[in-house]
Image: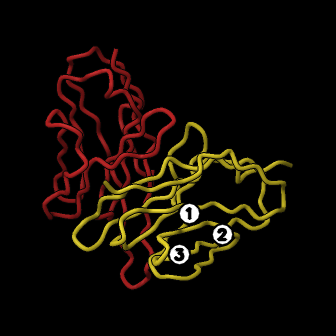
Amino acid sequence: GAGVSQSPSNKVTEKGKDVELRCDPISGHTALYWYRQRLGQGLEFLIYFQGNSAPDKSGLPSDRFSAERTGESVSTLTIQRTQQEDSAVYLCASSLWVSGSGRETQYFGPGTRLLVL
Amino acid sequence: QKEVEQNSGPLSVPEGAIASLNCTYSDRGSQSFFWYRQYSGKSPELIMFIYSNGDKEDGRFTAQLNKASQYVSLLIRDSQPSDSATYLCAVKAGAGSYQLTFGKGTKLSVIP
């Protein structure tokens, strides 16, 4: 498919367990974002990757959260020692800056719904 | 603390009317502004992007930006029931940062 894909679509885990979420961006998209959306809330920025540059990690809420991306490929978001407040939808988006157009295309994946019991 | 404020709504408009969605932001150095549409249970979809003062039109959608007033709006002309969704405003800080700050969204309901 041509869209952003994420896996798993749903994840139920026990408090204290580690989870790993995966994002497959659109081929050729240089930038990749991770967001978190709690129920009834707006999107909370977590981390941004652009090509091989150092990622912008300023949105990560604690050191339990980490993310990796190799080049312009798959990204994984890892949450260690999960807490109940980590329950949310985790969304990944990829984008391609269209030079000179003044328009950034950003496409979201379907999200991973994480429930920490 | 960078903030993006939106009226949570719901905003109800009759079919065919103009829907006006508003957003204010606190960081005067913000450079880029986005509007997303999010249907219930679905992922956000980028519908507009604006970075210069004034209006930007795309089909039935018009984004308006006033940096002096730190205000951005989205107008939807000839509103359709399919426009019923939550509209999220997002703001990107200045050079060197790609962090997006989102508002909590305005729920729009277009009444047939």
Determine if marks 2 and 3 fall on one subunit: yes
- Residue drawn at the location 50% of the way across and 47% of the way down: B104
Determine if marks 3 and 1 fall on one subunit: yes
Residue B47: give its label: 1
Residue A105 sits above or below residue A86 on the image: below
Q: Identify by letter the chain in red.
A: A
- Residue drawn at the location 36% of the way across and 24% of the way down: A11
Residue B65: give its label: 3
Residue B19 sits above or below residue B84 on the image: below
Viewport quadrant of the C terminus of chain A: top left
Identify residue type, mark 3: Leu
Chain label for disc 2: B
Give the spatial CA distance, label 1 vs label 2: 8 Å
B110 vs A97, nearest the viewer: B110
Q: Secondary structure at mark 2?
A: strand
User: Of marks 3 and 1, which one's residue comes earlier in the chain?
Assistant: 1
Identify residue type, mark 1: Ile
Chain B colour is yellow
The residue mark sitting in front, 3 or 1, is 3
